[in-house]
Amino acid sequence: MERQFRIYRYNPEVSPTPSFKTYTVDVQPAWTVLDALNAIKWDQDGSLTFRRSCRHGICGSCGMKINGKNGLACEIQVESLKGVITVEPLHGFRILRDLVTDMDGFFAHIEAVKPWLIAGTPPTDGERLQSPEDRKQLDGLYECILCGACTSACPSYWVNDDFLGPAALLKAARYVMDTRDEGFAERVDVLDSRNGLWRCHTIFNCVEACPKSLNPTEAIVKLRQKLTALKI
Amino acid sequence: MEHHRHDVVVVGAGIAGLYAAMKAGESADVGVLSKVYPTRSHSGAAQGGSAAALGNEGEDSWEYHLYDTVRGGDFLGDQDAQELLVKEAIPVTYEMEHLGLPFSRTPEGKIAQRPFGGHFSKFGKGPVKRSCYVADRSGHAQLHLLYEQSLKQGVRFYNEFLVTSLIIEGGVCRGLVALEIRTGNLHAFWARAVMLATGGYARAWRVTSNSHANTGDGLPLVAKAGVPLEDMEFVQFHPTGLYPHGILVSEAARGEGGYLFNGEGVRFMEKYAASKMELAPRDVVSRAEQTEIDEGRGIDGGEYLNLDLTHLGADAILERLPQIHELVVKFAAVDCTKKPIPIQPTAHYSMGGIPTDLDTRVLLDGKKQVVEGLYASGECACVSNHGANRLGTNSTMEAAVFGRRGGIAMAKFVRGAGPILPGDERDTAAAEEEIEALRSRTGRESAKVIRAELQASMTENVGIFRTAEKLQKQVKFMQTLKERFKEVGVSDGSRAFNTELTELIELGGMLDFSEIISVSALARQESRGAHSRKDYPKRDDVQWLRHTLAFREADGSIRLDYKPVVINRFQPEERKY
């Protein structure tokens, strides 16, 4: 079935001005947006540039804006989209070329929250024990694939990209909520900073944007409660 | 050209590369190059867990794990390496827990374990729960953990760098040249120790569980330096690739109790492995599936079968297999709590690769002589842990155990070695010329067409069942494809993010190692593990209980040599499940 894809094109080596270019693709059954992008690149226009790897929603490479909504190109079925399909890079990040954005700042924010377990000496002869209930606290936190869909959807991030953003704060929660972790105090400086937890205005765009159905806003609220309790 | 120096340079940021980087980073200055951002590597797609005989959920021992690994590999694995794998799996699992891996837990709070194909207790006699898991996102959780720990160690990451050449002189690896994808510039990296952890090569098949990135990039680099590739004919087809995409539906689905049905509604595994049924090793189950499909007993006579989980109940599925549930809904529009999942065998894992010793040092002759300063671990390497067929959950564990061993070995080596010897433009000129020549190509052949023909022909001729006739056809066809590859042009004239160029580099490598796979497979006149010859249906321990070593000669031809298997504990016996 023929479908039209209107794709954001930008290549500073060729022109300083971005534009949209429309391609017609003979879409096969069960094709995802990524399949269509590959078909365009391989059959029509070798210069079309995007990131992709796992093609089943676990590596986080192909976050982009599809018909106005952030998601992963590899897991959105073309059939589920109406009309001409508009594909743009994730907003809020510097665009390097076409659908490829600069994710260095995004990853630097992840690093800033100290995303590692901060804990005392572990037992010498086996694992630390953690009850299934305590482990359950991490469900909804550890599954993040760092695709950037949430941070890119966040108005607070658009106006200030020093804001850690929902993905980094979700990552902080993944460690803070881990009953094995004792490092909350070490993370307070960054979480309580002007670019930390309080920059979130609970707009919930991140929740809507997450292709893994995670809830960064809820994680941010929990971290705030913990921070407030510490201060009192 | 920009030049960089590190004590240790690791190529690839999957579990093996990052474990090595993290460990070496404790005392050495480490740089990691990855052609994707970290956490995008294909280790993240591993689902079901990593094997370690913790015995948290019933009796287990490393001896049982060793026996299963030896037998699962159809006795081609080197038993000294396998012993290290199963013994060190236990402390490595605890180390990952101590680092913070969010393992699923038993009611007492220990690391939870689940059954997996080919793993048993009491030397093949009883069931066992050996896979230590994080729901069905085990690889994802490990990959993120090791990336984060590497950050903590101060490892320097070079994201989106594709290695194009190794600099090896006089049996010493001094560094490498890599393309910075973002700018299109080449960079030289000078190091005392270089580790290749570049992953597997199942992208050379049409139906594959592998990511677009799994193009086996490290293999042609070492082959070019005169290092042989070991046991390349052994490629695993996973029994449960989602139909028709081929993406992975974890073996955990069968570990948790899933059944396989053919088009006649029969649990067909009773014909092929009456005792272990769906939990027989992957080569056995994939052959059974392919036989059912070939004999017309696929679902509606088609190219797929059913994996049924419905009897497990929705609660168990959503608790233990949440990602599978999500994947199957998204990619097959099937709710697996209510309906069976359409599946087919899918090219999945490369048992063969770069020959190394137990400290992951690359072997120049494939046997004893090391390339000083060059290491390899994970799926790109062949130490050999998996022999002719890998057991599920042994791959992520191999990546962790041998990545770790490599990291420790490199740190030790660089402490005793002299200073880094940086080279100059004379050392990198050839690498630069090669890439510039590729960039300015103007031929009329299509990379897409050549890639598709490679994948289709490898599936047809070097698939689950092989014959001399098919393999000869493939060896010949590889020459045609390689000739046509020379005529592929690059239409994208830009330097920055020229993914047409990177795809071309990857394709050239795939053609190189696919020919080596085909030649190695043609020579091996027996059936062992994943290498199944219809014209030689039996295992032949007299002639073929030995590893293949395939050398790419200076004139472009391939020379085969062989080396004995290390057998120090379990003698070959009939393999029956």
Image (cartoon, rainbow, N blue to C red):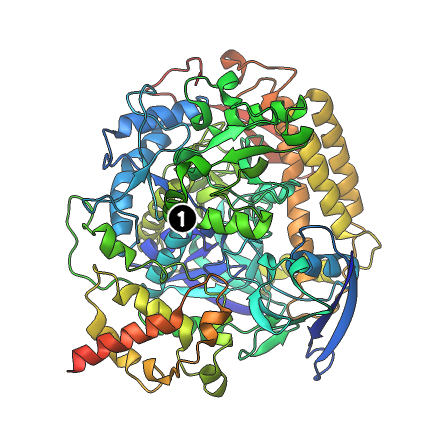
Q: How many marks?
A: 1
Which amino acid, mark 1? Leu
- B561 vs B372: above or below: above
- B410 vs B270: above or below: below
Percent x, y for residue A29? 71, 50
Query: Which residue occupies 54% across, 59% down?
Result: B35
Quarter occupied by the N terminus of chain B:
bottom right
| Residue B2 left/right relative to B390 | right
Quarter occupied by the C terminus of chain B:
top left
Percent x, y for residue A28? 73, 51
Q: Is residue B506 visible?
A: yes
Residue A135 sits in quarter: bottom left
Residue A8 sits in quarter: bottom right
> Which chain is home to disc 1?
B
Query: Which residue occupies 66% across, 29% down?
Result: B519
Q: Is residue A168 visible?
A: no
* Residue under numbered circle 1: B318
Q: Nearer the viewer, residue A142 or B473?
A: A142
Q: Nearer the viewer, residue B50 or B197?
A: B50
**In terms of secondary structure, where does tag 1 sit?**
helix
Percent x, y for residue B48? 41, 42
Q: Residues within 10 Å of mark 1 (few under 14, many from 20)?
A: some
| Residue B331 left/right relative to B70 | right
| Residue B275 left/right relative to A52 | left
